Image: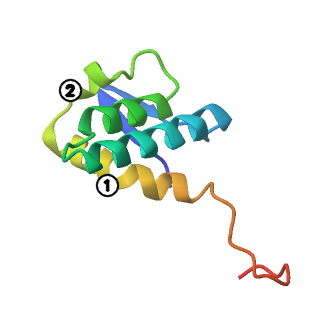
Amino acid sequence: MDLKVTLNGTTYTAPAPMMREFKQYIKFLRTAARKREEGQEAVEEEFAFIACLFQDKAVTPEALDSADFATGEQLLNGYSQWLAQYMPKQTAKNGVSR
């Protein structure tokens, strides 16, 4: 599964995430949890995280703001599935993969 976005006629594909994106993901999750506790949403932070996944200076939160509604919905619903493919499988206590 690829994570793609088209902005101003150019299609960008996110490369496989590296440790820096994993760190950003942890930061985003913590910020979102804190904001939920305060009764707020972390929409801006979520799209900033999505933008960082593309590792391209042309894909910024501001650039994503100019994308159409369907693209925003697609990114919002697709990035976690895309990330999941890079997460290690759970292993049972005896060391056998599930």
Q: Amino acid at mark 1?
A: Asn
Residue labelled with disc 1:
77
Residue labelled with disc 2:
65
Q: Residue furthest front?
A: 38
Q: Quadrant of the C terminus?
A: bottom right
The reply, left or right, for residue 65 in relation to residue 94 is left
Residue at left offset 85%, top offset 78%: 95
The reply, left or right, for residue 89 in relation to residue 85 is right
Q: Is residue 52 above or below residue 84?
A: above
- Comes first in the chain, label 1 or label 2: 2
Q: For this rendering, which residue is in front, 72 or 8? A: 72
Question: What is the x, y in percent for residue 70?
Answer: 18, 46
Query: Which disc, if any, is residue 92?
Result: none
The reply, left or right, for residue 86 in relation to residue 79 is right
Question: What is the x, y in percent for residue 10?
Answer: 35, 24
> Quarter of the image holding residue 59?
top left
The reply, left or right, for residue 35 in relation to residue 54 is left
Secondary structure beneath label 2: helix
Q: Residue furthest top?
A: 57
Q: CA distance from mark 1 to mark 2?
A: 16 Å
Question: What is the x, y in percent for residue 75?
Answer: 32, 45
Q: For this rendering, which residue is in front, 78 or 33? A: 33
> Quarter of the image holding residue 31?
top left
